Amino acid sequence: MGSFLSRYRVDKMSNIEKMKLVVKDKTTKKYGLIAGLAYFLIYLWSIGNLTIIQMPEVFMFKVIENWPNLIFKQVAPYLWEPIAKFYIYGGLVFFLSVPNLILDIFLSILVYLNISLAFYSYYIYPLRPGVLGLISLVPSLFTGVVCCVPTIFLTLGAASTSFTLLFISVRQYLVPISILIMLVNVYWTVDHMDWEMINIYESEKKE
């Protein structure tokens, strides 16, 4: 790590190298993983792929009949039919839908990256006092507060049965908008992270 950082004390870091440092940081990675995992489970719960029903407390995996015809069958925009049921324990059931799972994993990764970047930017901020320090905090505030709001409302909205019709009508827009916002925030935050502050922060971690 020392040789890596020393190469960038004169020349600016690329966004890819900044991102590598963020995902390698143990503290920021921890918060990102917690947020990503929480989002992953909430999303599955909100779309009904993870639920609790009355059932015997046994483990069981059951494939739905004519599952090949259901893999890519949509029930709503960005919602697909399950092809299997996994009865876990105590009434907890996981309905396996491959497209839903892929989309959930992708969104969870974006949440993980955004939250990790938010904390990393926050840790860099105190290193620069005064007005410039407040400016350095902007990326973390923008990432941590703004980027995940659409996706949080997306998951909570799906779980509310009283807004089912409204949710279905706007879901086709909320999902791509949420993805776009989080992607833009990842790029914007990484691009505006001060490489000199990164060098200082990484150097202080080694002391």
Image: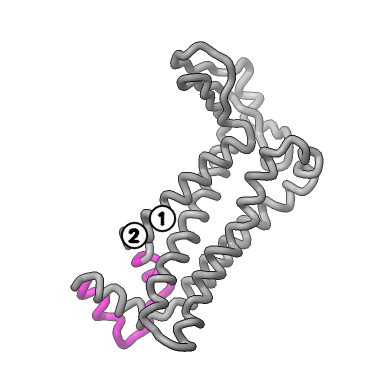
Quadrant in which the C terminus is drawn: bottom left
The residue pinned by badge 1 equals: 31
Residue at the farthest front position: 130
Write the start and end of the magenta stretch as one range. Answer: 1-21
Rendered position, 200 above or below 160: below
Q: Residue at x 21, y 75 (%)?
A: 3
Residue at the farthest left position: 207
**Residue 10 at x, y = what percent?**
31, 88
Left or right: where does residue 70 sit relative to residue 192? right
Give the Cα distance between marks 2 and 1: 7 Å
Rendered position, 29 above or below 104: below
The residue pinned by badge 2 equals: 27
Residue 161 occupies which quadrant of the picture? top right
Queried whether the magenta region covers residue 3, the answer comes back as yes
* Crowd class of label 2 (few under 14; some 14 to 19; many from 20; radius 10 Å): some
Rendered position, 116 above or below 127: above
Residue 128 occupies which quadrant of the picture? bottom left
Q: What type is the residue that disc 1 sits on? A: Tyr
Q: What type is the residue that disc 2 sits on? A: Thr
Queried whether the magenta region covers residue 169, the answer comes back as no
Q: Secondary structure at mark 1?
A: helix
**Residue 160 at x, y = what percent?**
71, 39
What's the image's color scheme? Answer: one colour
**Residue 188 at x, y = what percent?**
54, 72
